[in-house]
Amino acid sequence: MVEFIRYSATDLMSYQGTWKADKQKFVGAEYTLGKRTLGPVESDGSGTVSGSFRDPSGFGDAHMVGLVDAKGDVVAAGAVTLTPLATLRDKTEPQGQFFHIHVDGLGVGPYTSDYDVLYDNHLLGDVTAVSTGGVANFTVRAEGAVGKHTIQLISGSVEGQPYLNLAQSPFSFRSNYSFTVNVTKGHPVTVSDPLPRPKPSVGQHLTASIGSGTVGQSFTLTGFGLAPYHSY
């Protein structure tokens, strides 16, 4: 009698990330391991298991994938590496609007957990997905003259500097992305967050005017209801 055994294909290295801080000291990213089921499979009469599964959305890098029996024991396992995928929603935007980029599969390592973003070879910043499960959505503003421009996602170092010479990068195997975008004539406006108007700050027997300001700015401190001829 041939026994057919049912297994579950399981990602044995499903990550969950958080940003960690020790009071006022920023520590960095911290990841914990978990498991997630990819789907059921069943052995045939010869004891062979065969199945295919779509790479799940989430953190990339190396993952251990195994077969788990009904008792929860791992009876077989192997490693796969998930590489990130970046997609651009629209290639054309008017000046002042934004290009929307989606990245799935950012890793958990110091050289795989982020991308440096460049616009016409100018560094804009970094993209990470520590607390968003390896998936990042961000925008790049359509700037500059009407015509073609370039958005690049380049792997970099832990210091946040991109490897412009990718051929000699220690992680040259990592996927990098370059999008040619088109900027059309638009009506860009300056985006700013205005500071609140300074107001006097009133305390016990004292008034400071102004109550807030920028570094180097002067303010006046006025006292009232104090003891006469007394030094403070």
Image (spheres, rainbow, N blue to C red):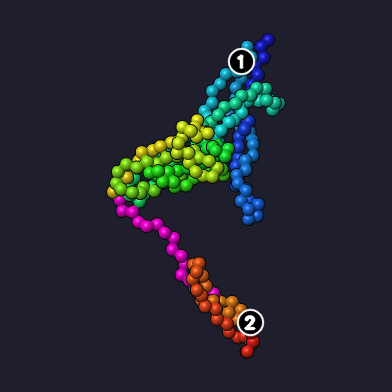
Per the image, is 190 magenta?
yes
Q: Residue at x 52, y 35 (%)?
A: 105
Q: Residues within 10 Å of mark 1 (few under 14, many from 20)?
A: few
User: Alpha-carbon distance for marks 2 and 1?
Assistant: 89 Å
Residue 214 to residue 128: above or below: below
Q: Which residue is drawn at 54% across and 76% down?
A: 208
Q: Position of residue 170 (x, y in %)?
A: 53, 34
Badge 1 amino acid: Thr
Quadrant in the rendering for residue 42: top right
Q: Which residue lies furthest to the top in this view?
A: 1
Per the image, is 71 magenta?
no
Residue 197 to residue 91: above or below: below
Badge 2 amino acid: Tyr
Magenta range is 186-201
Please identify the quadrant where the N terminus is shown: top right
User: Which residue was labeled with disc 1?
Assistant: 48
User: Which residue was labeled with disc 2?
Assistant: 232
Q: Do the residues labelled 2 and 1 touch (CB within 8 Å)?
A: no
Q: Is residue 215 among what the camera can see? A: yes
Q: Which residue is drawn at 61% across and 15% down?
A: 48
Quadrant in the rendering for residue 35: top right
Q: Where is residue 4 in the image (x, y as percent from the top left)?
A: 65, 16
Q: Is residue 134 among what the camera can see? A: no
Residue 205 to residue 47: above or below: below
Q: In this view, does 29 lie to the left or right of 184?
A: right
Indicate which disc residue 11 carries.
none
Q: Is residue 189 left or right of residue 16?
A: left
Q: Position of residue 157 (x, y in %)?
A: 53, 41
